[in-house]
Image (tube, coloured by chain):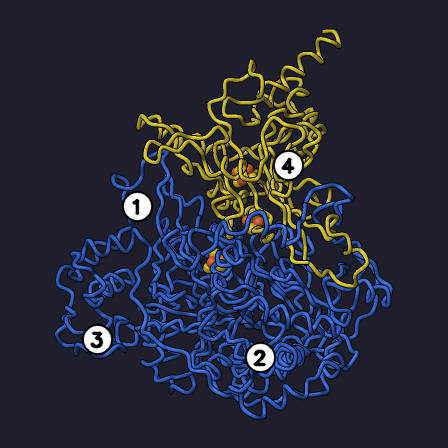
């Protein structure tokens, strides 16, 4: 193929560098690497003579795919096998660190239950097929499809995979891209967009002296957990920041709070307004920047009113306000449990109002800049897409749907009827590593290469003021000759659609290689093309900078429903953990055997209850309860502790998978998402995950026991974990690390 | 062997670190774990599974206490030093986390009880376990005050690593079989590799050159690892390592049963120090605003 036939602007678009317009002067088409050469490079980088030194481990950079944060990794390769992952110190996301999910990525790669061959549905079963058959069938079903009849549901996606995916949608003329993640910041992002003019501002934990977090589990599941963990370490060095966490059940972040406050789900907004009231009426702060209606809303949340609406002590509310004022600058965050309501937007907006009153905007909440290349920019998932997809499927709007990086049959509450509606979609193609719940319903299964076998580029959705593109490169030869990389599959699909622009690329590697040849010259720093590519692979990333943006505080009006917080019905909290995440890692034995950070349960589900509630229901640890919502019921064993609101029963996510998912997840626990009511946040359409009322009753005990790590919940008087007050710490160690 | 001989020997052995005579230490690997930074995330524990070929035993065996977590993150709900927690309605200061691995005691109570000397002290100051000498008496485990030794009650090879999971196994160390005791080694294979490299390059090991798997992955940098004997760095001319600095700053000394701190409020402490096992792991107090 000759590139001369393609217009320059189109070419840049194909390669992912489109969208920055005039700044691209001086960009050359590839000259040093021809496509033929590209082809030669497609051989594995594991060329024995150069790369395999018997007995010596060599480290290669890549990118973690265990959650959407996009941490940089180093993989240790010895004799052609990848043995261990570490964080890539050069990555600004995780600075050389790795979480337990990242560590366990190897067990997804080497998992004994991975799908090794394409499959095609014959009647009620999926049978092994060849790639030719699979591609043939897809070509046939998509040959004359009209764009509106086609949809693609993915998880969060970025980089060149996103570029190709968009190209494929375009080739079909479809705009139906549903991006779904159960664990997301969608409401926070919308509030930030509306109130600050930037959906993804930078949070300066390192500058903050105090933090008030309404259920934002930034050490576990909020934003970029590893990034915020590294920032948290700075927050906790002298002068040591104070962390106040408000949530219905304790998250990992809550477990590290100086003050943990139990909230009835839905009352977070009222509490935020009550604190705002105190800041204005007692702490002398001004709310003049806010719209009049919001000011009068704050005025209405007097201390008495707030106590009634939230059940939180008056002293405590006053104290929180005083602490935030005293320990300035502060930062106020809101996460899953605050956004998971029909008025979730208002709850998060009320939290953001606190940032405005406290003067945090511009101090601890800054503009983060915007990734310069729009088509590669991260597209973050949400649950609104799950709801609208379910509706569209029920309305029989689609003939062909692709699924990749998602398992909606597991993550969708049964009340959305998604599983049934899938029957309305005549042709479903699932790109998958495992035979999960969605894959089981496919008409064609395309087995994916693992993270450790594939090429890719990723742009982390949260970056602290930089624009890094993180490289994913194979750390070893594929375990199965019949799996394919995601990029390779999409590229092949594009070629099958006779998209001539892609014909010249032998494979995804060749495509990426060319993309890096055509990268705007300013990023190459004068290096030769080959040197540049080698450098990028060795570093694992390249910072292409960000477009500067600035925050503009905008007055946003919102109301707060008064009646919430008064009801006494129990509420189900489907809380998420850094571990199984949204359930996707329940097939990894290291994570099944890793005790939950809070309850220390292994290999199981559990329900968290406050001792007073457990007493009322008449259950003790390990007993079985029935949790019934309007949409279904689950039976699960209880764990009892004081880190949960008495009106709440929390059932962390992860288990309750169908048999096919893997031997490790099989017949294990329950999926608390399954019985949620189909309520949504009225402003954003996000699923209201923390708003399902349930009835909890004692159920018959089974033989199956709740297994937990650790004999004792207390130190029994021994000095195991010694604790000192923060003022002592400041006295002895203060000044050491003052910035 | 008379009783007085036995006691005498033990006493000389016990004081070997301070008074010399038993070991001429080349290194003395130690740690400092900051509980003000540790968030209880468990990354260290899983990193240890990945690095050290730890078997996954499954729910039933885990229930019997047969889990092989060389590094376990303990979680407690009470705060004896702050008092009030028992009476309050909520867990208002969160949880107390404690990452616990072999404390590499210099006067290790596990060592002298081994009938075949399968566990012994190395010139690196490590409490080592010789797998192919171990006969599975489990006396060491009984004698470990921290319960940080793990016994292979079964052969886990097939159940724990069904193909192709076994391809992940670290070839630098063995997979232990039934009847053998095992525990945290301070990632001895990583120490070995670095020492070999240094020797080949005709130089000394540098501070920070050996990273244990747990310390390397820890998201908050709570775990410092290094040589307690210090390391001379020709470039900076400094003999202190990061870990010795921490121990000095927090006024904890090896070889002491009771620390005589100038500033008693400095946060360093060793778990069960009064038992006189002289652990090489120092913890720094958790901190809470109260
Ligand atoms: S936070 Fe996400 S991307 Fe980072 S190491 Fe953990 S799983 Fe991987
Ligand atoms: S990895 Fe670090 S922060 Fe996490 S539990 Fe271990 S020591 Fe604590
Ligand atoms: S030092 Fe190594 S062996 Fe010991 S707990 Fe840490 S990772 Fe495991």
Q: Residue at x 36, y 71 (%)?
A: A162
Asked if the residue under mark 3 is in contact with the one under mark 4, i.e. CB atoms within 8 Å, the reply is no
C-alpha separation, residue under disc 2 versus residue under disc 1: 63 Å
Asked if A494 appears above or below B29 in the picture, the reply is below
Q: Secondary structure at mark 4?
A: loop
C-alpha separation, residue under disc 4 versus residue under disc 3: 59 Å
Can you tell which of label 2 and label 1 is closer to the viewer? 2
Q: Which mark is residue B270?
A: 4
Q: Which mark is residue A285?
A: 2
Q: Nearer the viewer, residue A132 or A312?
A: A312
Q: Which mark is residue A23?
A: 3
Dot 1 corresponds to which residue? A46
Q: Residue at x 50, y 46 (%)?
A: B165
Can you tell which of label 3 and label 1 is closer to the viewer? 3
Q: How far from the left and from the top, in percent, is residue A724?
A: 66, 49
Q: Secondary structure at mark 3?
A: helix
C-alpha separation, residue under disc 2 versus residue under disc 4: 46 Å
Q: Is residue A31 left or right of residue A376?
A: left
Residue at the extreme bottom of the image, as rendered: A292
Can you tell which of label 3 and label 2 is closer to the viewer? 2
Q: Is residue B180 left or right of residue A608?
A: left
Q: Secondary structure at mark 2?
A: loop
Q: Colour of chain A?
A: blue
C-alpha separation, residue under disc 3 versus residue under disc 2: 44 Å
Q: Badge 3 local density, few (<14 within 10 Å), some, or many (20+)?
A: few
Residue at the extreme top of the image, as rendered: B1
Q: Nearer the viewer, residue A494 or A214?
A: A214
Q: Nearer the viewer, residue A704 or A85?
A: A85
C-alpha separation, residue under disc 3 versus residue under disc 1: 38 Å
C-alpha separation, residue under disc 1 versus residue under disc 4: 47 Å
Can you tell which of label 2 and label 4 is closer to the viewer? 2
Asked if the residue under mark 4 is in contact with the one under mark 1, i.e. CB atoms within 8 Å, the reply is no
């Amino acid at each position: 193929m000759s590139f001369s036939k393609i217009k320059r602007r189109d070419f840049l678009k194909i390669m992912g560098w489109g969208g920055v317009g005039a700044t691209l002067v001086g960009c050359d088409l590839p000259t040093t690497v021809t496509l033929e050469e590209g082809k030669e490079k497609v051989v594995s980088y594991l060329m024995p003579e150069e790369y395999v030194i018997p007995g010596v481990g060599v480290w290669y950079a890549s990118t973690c795919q265990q959650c959407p944060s996009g941490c940089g990794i180093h993989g240790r390769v010895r004799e052609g096998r990848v043995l261990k992952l570490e964080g890539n110190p050069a990555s600004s996301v995780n600075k050389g660190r790795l979480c337990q999910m990242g560590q366990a990525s190897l067990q997804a790669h080497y998992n004994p239950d991975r799908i090794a061959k394409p499959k095609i549905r014959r009647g009620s079963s999926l049978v092994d097929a060849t790639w030719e058959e699979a591609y043939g069938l897809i070509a046939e079903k998509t040959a004359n499809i009209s764009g509106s009849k086609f949809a693609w549901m993915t998880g969060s996606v970025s980089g060149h995979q996103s570029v190709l995916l968009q190209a494929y949608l375009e080739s079909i003329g479809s705009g139906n891209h549903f991006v779904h993640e159960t664990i997301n910041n969608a409401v926070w992002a919308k509030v930030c967009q509306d109130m600050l003019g930037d959906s993804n501002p930078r949070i300066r934990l390192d500058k903050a002296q105090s933090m008030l977090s309404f259920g934002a589990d930034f050490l576990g599941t909020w934003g970029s957990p590893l990034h915020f963990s590294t920032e948290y370490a700075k927050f906790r060095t002298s002068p040591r920041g104070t962390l106040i966490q408000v949530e219905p059940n304790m998250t990992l972040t809550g477990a590290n709070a100086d003050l943990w406050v139990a909230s009835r789900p839905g009352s977070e907004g009222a509490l935020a307004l009550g604190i705002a009231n105190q800041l204005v009426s007692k702490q002398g702060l001004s709310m003049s920047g806010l719209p009049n209606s919001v000011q009068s809303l704050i005025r209405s949340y007097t201390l008495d009113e707030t106590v009634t609406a939230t059940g939180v002590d008056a002293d405590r509310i006053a104290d929180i306000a005083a602490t935030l004022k005293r320990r300035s600058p502060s930062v106020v965050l809101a996460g899953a449990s605050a956004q998971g309501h029909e008025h979730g937007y208002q709850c998060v907006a009320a939290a953001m109002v606190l940032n405005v009153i406290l003067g945090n905007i511009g101090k601890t909440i800054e503009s983060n800049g915007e990734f310069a290349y729009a088509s590669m920019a991260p597209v973050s998932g949400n649950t609104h897409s799950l709801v609208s997809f379910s509706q569209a499927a029920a309305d029989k709007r689609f003939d062909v749907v692709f699924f990749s990086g998602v398992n909606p049959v597991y993550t969708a509450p049964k009340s959305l009827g998604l599983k049934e509606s899938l029957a309305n979609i005549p042709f479903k193609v699932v790109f998958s590593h495992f035979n999960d719940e969605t894959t089981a319903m496919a008409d064609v299964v395309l087995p994916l290469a693992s993270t450790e076998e594939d090429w890719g580029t990723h742009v982390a959705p949260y970056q602290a003021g930089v624009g890094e593109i993180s490289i994913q490169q194979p750390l070893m030869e594929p375990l199965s000759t019949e799996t394919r990389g995601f990029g390779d599959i999409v590229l092949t699909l594009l070629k099958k659609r006779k998209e001539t622009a892609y014909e010249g690329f032998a494979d995804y590697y060749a495509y990426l290689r060319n993309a890096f040849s055509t990268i705007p010259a300013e990023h190459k720093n004068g290096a030769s093309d080959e040197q540049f590519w080698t450098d990028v692979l060795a570093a694992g990333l390249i910072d292409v900078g960000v477009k500067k943006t600035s925050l503009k505080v905008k007055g946003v009006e919102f109301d707060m429903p008064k009646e919430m917080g008064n009801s006494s019905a129990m509420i189900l909290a489907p809380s998420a953990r850094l571990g199984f995440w949204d359930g996707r890692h329940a097939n990894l034995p290291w994570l099944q055997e890793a005790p939950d950070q809070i309850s220390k349960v292994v290999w199981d589900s559990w329900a968290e209850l406050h001792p007073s509630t457990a007493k009322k229901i008449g259950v003790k640890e390990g007993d079985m309860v029935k949790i019934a919502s309007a949409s279904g019921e689950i039976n699960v064993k209880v764990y009892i502790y004081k880190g949960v609101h008495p009106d709440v029963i929390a059932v962390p996510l992860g288990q309750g998978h169908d048999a096919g998912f893997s031997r490790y997840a099989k017949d294990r626990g329950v999926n608390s998402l399954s019985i949620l009511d189909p309520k949504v946040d009225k402003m954003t359409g996000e699923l209201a995950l923390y708003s399902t009322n349930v009835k909890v009753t004692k159920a018959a005990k089974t033989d199956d026991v709740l297994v937990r790590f650790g004999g004792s919940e207390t130190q029994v008087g021994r000095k195991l974990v010694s604790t000192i007050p923060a003022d002592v710490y400041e006295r002895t160690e203060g000044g050491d690390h003052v910035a | 062997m008379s009783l007085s001989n036995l006691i005498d020997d033990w006493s000389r052995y016990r004081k070997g670190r301070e008074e010399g005579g038993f070991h001429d230490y080349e290194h003395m690997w130690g740690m400092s774990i900051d509980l003000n930074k540790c968030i209880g995330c468990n990354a260290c524990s899983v990193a240890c599974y990945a690095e050290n070929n730890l078997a996954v035993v499954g729910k039933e065996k885990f229930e019997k206490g047969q889990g092989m977590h060389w590094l376990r993150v303990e979680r407690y709900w009470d705060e004896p030093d702050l008092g009030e927690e028992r009476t309050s309605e909520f867990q208002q200061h969160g949880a107390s986390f404690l990452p616990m691995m072999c404390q590499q005691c210099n006067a290790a109570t596990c060592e002298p009880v081994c009938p075949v000397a399968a566990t012994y002290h190395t010139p690196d100051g490590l409490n080592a376990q010789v797998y192919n000498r171990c006969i599975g008496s489990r006396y060491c485990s009984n004698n470990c005050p921290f319960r940080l030794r793990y016994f292979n009650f079964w052969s886990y090879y097939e159940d724990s690593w069904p193909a192709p999971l076994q391809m992940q196994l670290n070839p630098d160390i063995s997979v232990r079989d039934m009847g053998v005791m095992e525990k945290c080694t301070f990632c001895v294979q990583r120490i070995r590799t670095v020492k070999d490299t240094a020797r080949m390059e005709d130089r000394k090991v540098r501070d920070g050159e050996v990273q244990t798997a747990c310390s390397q992955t820890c998201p908050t940098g709570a775990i410092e690892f290094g040589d307690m004997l210090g390391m001379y760095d020709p470039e900076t001319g400094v003999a202190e390592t990061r870990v010795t600095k921490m121990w000095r700053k927090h006024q904890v000394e090896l070889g002491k049963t009771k620390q005589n701190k100038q500033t008693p409020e400095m946060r360093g402490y060793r778990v069960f120090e009064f038992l006189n096992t002289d652990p090489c792991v120092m913890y720094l107090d958790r901190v809470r605003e109260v």
